[in-house]
Image (tube, rainbow, N blue to C red):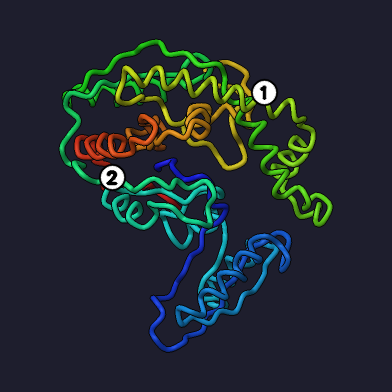
């Protein structure tokens, strides 16, 4: 998924109706919000509700503090659509994402549609770029011959599961078949995870820390953990994290002066049961909250475009992703490489065995 967007969506809105005709139609929408009718999701939906009137759509919002109940009411037809997390949403839409992402993009054709909708400045998003939008899709089918690619397994700080390392390393060599040069420059970064977590925790606490007083009993353990750590961070902690990010950006830019793309594993381990992140990887004790996804953190911070593409399966039949990172502002090359890999190693025909 391209990481050009400044914010992650915390929920997926599953609209189960067709586009509104000229005449006004009415729909009931179930909204999951742990704070109920006064929470941030309901507040956002009330703004959306007003805008929807202009589209010929009159909506009735129902707040739910229990997401399971909201999902069951959607299934039972009590509501026509629901604002729920991706975990629940997968029962209704197989391409819905996780709790905090916009979801999986199954093919490059779907990505073309997504970029046409999302690209460009939006005044409601202070982080969106004002630059003119390039044609990301120009030359998408031109191949990648002649590109110079860097490969990095763990970039000096991450512990990677051997099976994941093997599968993704083999996938990187596919680009040699496509006419690229693939090299391992032994690129090393200082661990970016501490800086990432400082910025992440303080950002969450700043936006949602008030929920610790308003509805503490409704917070998940993870939310409480984030808020508590964010509340303890000092201005000096935050300043050090920002400085660390600036230094990391400079090191990555130095690397990308030589290479067109950087390839890494997307995740450090194969998929694991929900709520059970590993505390050991490759025989080493690791922090379970952060060690399963160390390779995406630097590029969430650096603002570089990146994509994760399916490149193989673990011994248990679970998907493994290859991480393709481009130069700042060069989404086009990331997309071109993703399309080339998809054509060389198609995966759309694979279907998981889900009970």
Q: Earlier in the sequence, mark 1 or mark 2?
A: 2
- Residue 312 point in image, percent of width and height: 33, 33
Look at 79% across and 33% down and name the residue there: 232
In contact (CB < 8 Å): disc 1 and disc 2: no
312 vs 19: above or below: above
Residue 344 vs residue 26: left or right?
left
> Marks 1/2: CA distance?
35 Å
* Residue under pointer 2: 136
Mark 2 burial class by Cα count in 10 Å: few <14, some 14-19, many 20+: some
Across and down, in percent, residue 105 comes to 37, 49
Question: Which residue is painted at 46% across and 63% down in the image?
Answer: 92
- The mark total stands at 2
Nearer the observer, 126 or 5: 126
Q: Nearer the viewer, residue 319 or 212?
A: 212
Q: Quadrant of the N terminus?
A: top left
Residue labelled with disc 1: 240
Q: Residue furthest bottom?
A: 23
Q: In percent of the image, x 56 and y 50: which residue is there?
A: 99
């Amino acid at each position: 998924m391209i990481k050009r967007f400044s914010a992650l969506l915390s929920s997926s809105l599953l609209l189960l109706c067709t586009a509104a005709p000229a005449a006004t139609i009415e729909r009931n929408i179930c909204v999951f919000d742990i704070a109920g009718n006064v929470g941030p999701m309901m507040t956002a939906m009330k703004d959306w509700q007003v805008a929807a009137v202009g589209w010929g759509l009159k909506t009735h919002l129902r707040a739910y503090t229990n997401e399971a109940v909201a999902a069951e009411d959607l299934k039972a037809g009590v509501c026509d659509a629901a604002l729920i997390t991706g975990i629940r949403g997968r029962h209704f839409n197989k391409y819905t994402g996780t709790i905090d992402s916009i979801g999986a993009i199954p093919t490059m054709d779907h990505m073309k549609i997504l970029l046409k909708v999302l690209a460009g400045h939006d005044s409601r998003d202070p982080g969106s770029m004002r630059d003119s939008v390039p044609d990301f899709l120009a030359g998408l089918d031109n191949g990648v011959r002649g590109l110079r690619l860097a490969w990095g397994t763990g970039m000096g700080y991450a512990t990677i599961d051997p099976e994941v390392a093997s599968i993704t390393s083999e996938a990187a060599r596919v680009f040699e078949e496509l006419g690229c040069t693939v090299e391992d420059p032994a690129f090393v970064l200082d661990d970016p995870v501490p800086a990432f977590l400082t910025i992440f925790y303080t950002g969450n606490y700043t936006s949602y820390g008030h929920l610790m007083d308003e509805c503490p009993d409704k917070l998940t353990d993870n939310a409480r953990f984030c808020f508590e750590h964010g509340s303890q961070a000092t201005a000096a902690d935050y300043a050090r994290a920002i400085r660390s990010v600036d230094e990391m950006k400079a090191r990555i830019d130095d690397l990308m002066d030589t290479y067109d793309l950087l390839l890494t594993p997307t995740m450090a381990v194969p998929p694991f049961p929900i709520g059970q992140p590993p505390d050991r990887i490759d025989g080493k004790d690791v922090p379970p909250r952060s060690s399963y996804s160390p390779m995406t953190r630097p590029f969430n911070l650096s603002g570089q475009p990146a994509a994760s593409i399916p490149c193989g399966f673990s011994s248990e039949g679970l998907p493994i992703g290859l991480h393709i990172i481009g130069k700042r502002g060069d989404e086009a090359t990331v997309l071109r490489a993703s399309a080339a890999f998809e054509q060389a190693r198609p995966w759309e025909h694979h279907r998981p065995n889900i009970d």
